[in-house]
Image (cartoon, rainbow, N blue to C red):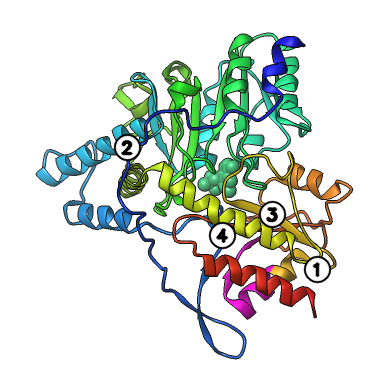
Amino acid sequence: MPTLTIFSSVPDQAAPSVPDAGSRPIPAVLGADLQVPVKGGRLVGYANLDYAASAPCLEPVNAAVAAALPAYSSVHRGAGYASQLTTARYEQARHTVRAFVGARPDDAVIFTRNTTDATNLLARCLPAGTTTVVFDTEHHASLLPWPKSVRLAPPAFPGEAVRAADEALAGIDGPKLLVVTAASNVTGELWPIAALAHIAHRHGARILVDAAQLVPHRRLNLTALDLDYVAFSGHKLYAPFGAGVLVGRGDWLAEGEPYLKGGGAVRTVGDVAEWHDDPEPRHEAGTPNVLGAIALAAACDALTATGWTALVREEERLLARLRSGLASVEGVRELALWGDDHPRVGIVSFTVAGYPAREVAEALSSEYGIGVRDGKFCAHPFVRHLLEAPDGGGSGRDHENDGGCADGTASAVRASIGIGTTQEHVDRLIEALRDLVSR
Ligand SMILES: Cc1ncc(COP(=O)(O)O)c(C=O)c1O
């Protein structure tokens, strides 16, 4: 199809070319000096290489929570000064998130518990009969919530993703939603979300972008990319206080059943309840996680103040070192869908020939003080696909604790980096792997 050839090479970047206003030094994270025990009883500095699961807390996030706590009080329901202050901080957090993702003025910003909660919220608000188109490469949070879905095989290259979405959407009548992750939690690879948004809209569909692994690493501009919805979690964005968000078009959300039924979502209650049709109160019944929202917003502010140019430059330097180091260790194979040169964030999954992933992860922890993740990273179909590739090299069994996502088959190890990662952490991982495979 000639109109699609423009999408067949390198994908669009999630960050459009808007000037980068930040200029503050990269903030520190809490726990940078954490000492952990290793075999023999020694203590070593913890090398946290598990940011894609949950990132450590930024110091400015900690400070924002500490500043809010002395006046902490009820939200949206108190006349007292502390209640008003807490309510103002909560609503300010909403504005901050709106600006952080470049949302349209009339987009809803709904605080949720996490990304999984956000995708499930949207799933409950889909117009009747909506068909969702989703790739098998998705995290379970974006793969599973949909009442009716068409699943697409992992595409061989970015243009194939656009072509497959185009074909699938063309064959669907009625309301449709395309769901795609902006940056893979398995390979770190960036997806061509602007091109996918374009295709979705050409077919009268909407697009939800799972930005859980993008926003800690790259600027996202929902308006410039013409996305309908984005979802992400605070705990991956250096704000470990249990909040996430769904941002996007208000109409489906205003029509959908209130996510939780109770105070805050209801306008009046007589014999029947009259619900708010403003999506934010409608879907935020009960007392919200105000500290989570404040923390999430503080993380957005801290990243913006630092500026993406500096953040991306440092991450790319460490990621290049990590990837070339892994490639130099015999038997270590990086998992990738779209090849070595495809743009990606600081997430690398790999296998070690002959060594079960769990054993590798345990040895890294107990002998070297390195924290990584092993398993299938709650992306079973995708990891299985990568491991079954001729050079996938999957070995060992899932352990039972893979975020509740173990299925007892071969799995991989994942190292992920971010603010606070040092060159020593990266080098220690490479040397530890070299040591392990030489035994
Ligand atoms: C791409 C992606 N989407 C969704 C999720 C789910 O996030 P949460 O556990 O915060 O709901 C994750 C978490 O690993 C993820 O990496």
Labels 2 and 4 touching (C-beta < 8 A): no
User: Pointer 3: what residue?
Assistant: 349
- Residue 325 or residue 74, whichever sits in front: 325
Asked whether 364 falls inside the magenta stretch, the response is yes
- Secondary element under disc 4, as helix, strand or loop, is loop
User: Pointer 4: what residue?
Assistant: 50
- The span picked out in magenta is 361-373
- Secondary element under disc 1, as helix, strand or loop, is loop
Disc 1 crowd, CA 10 A, few/some/many (<14, 14-19, 20+) = some
Residue for point 83% across, 61% down:
395
User: Pointer 2: what residue?
Assistant: 21
Q: What is the CA distance from the residue labelled 4 to the residue labelled 1?
A: 20 Å
Disc 3 crowd, CA 10 A, few/some/many (<14, 14-19, 20+) = many
- Residue 21 or residue 227, whichever sits in front: 21
User: Pointer 1: what residue?
Assistant: 355
The amino acid sitting under disc 2 is Ala
